[in-house]
Amino acid sequence: MSYYSAVQPSSLKQYYSENDIVDFIIKMKTGRAILPGSIRLSGQLSVETNRATDKKIVLEDMVHLDQYAGVHSFIRSINTQVNNSTIENVQQYPRIVSMMTQANSTLESLVTSSSNLCELKGLTNHFQLVGNSNVGDASTISFSMLPQISLNMASDLIAQEKFQNIQLSMVLANSVEALFTSLKQNDERMKGIDKFTSLEYKLFNLLLIKSICDSATALCISDNLKLSPFI
């Protein structure tokens, strides 16, 4: 049987934004293992403008993410350490994800696949960015992304016996690297009180979620998951 296990960032903040470094440290109980391809980053995303009045974005602002990278756009780089040794250091991470998505998906599959939509990929992400829930005064949209890292591409169980200490460090991107608007400078909306010149984002309630099983018996049954109190 496998269990969901969640890890919070080692440096907790109310929210994370551009140029922040987000570290996750994974330590498992003896005899446990992580199921390959099960490590996900989840949270809530809020995007706002620098308008003097109402900063929340609306559909008319036409704010987008890269349709092939989605919420991966907010991560500039990822460093993976195992037992205090770096095994991976991925720079220009959104570009790599975008190329991988273009190689494996069509525009049609991006908007018809729930696994892509929960990563805010596809032509409709400007609808999603408006948000459908609130964290305080911020309008947010929930996301769950599968980081394209070596641990998620492993061919065997990631067992505690060999992986006593795992650390993932993510450097968040600038807003201008991740977000853009399809409005032009001479568009009517960019002349009046609705005009904005920059965008900013906040990531709330970040969790690194993974599926853990018994490495001795390797009984990983993804159909019967339950919350585990252990990491």
Image (spheres, grey):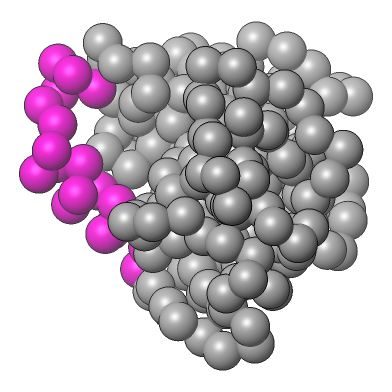
Residue 196 pos. (x, y %):
56, 36
Looking at the picture, how far across and down is residue 114, in whole percent?
38, 15
Magenta residue check for 107: yes
Image position of 186 (left or right of 141):
left
- 28 is higher (above) or lower (below) than 35: below
Q: Residue at x 67, y 53 (%)?
A: 32
Q: Which residues are magenta?
A: 92-110
Q: Is residue 178 left or right of residue 55?
A: left
Residue in the picture at 45% in, 14% down: 127
Q: Nearer the viewer, residue 6 or 53?
A: 6
Q: How many marks?
A: 0
- The answer to whether residue 145 is left or right of residue 203 is left
Q: Is residue 182 above or below residue 164?
A: above
Q: Quadrant of the N terminus?
A: top right
Residue that appears at 51% across and 25% down: 222
Residue drawn at point x = 63 percent, y = 45 percent:
214
Examine the rendered structure and indicate whether residue 184 appears above or below residue 60: below
* Quadrant hosting residue 126: top left
Whole-percent x, y for residue 37 in the image: 42, 45
**Image coords of residue 52 (percent x, y):** 74, 33
Residue 20 drawn in magenta: no
User: Toward the viewer: 90 or 122?
Assistant: 90
224 relative position to 103: left or right: right
Whether residue 125 appears in this view of the structure is no
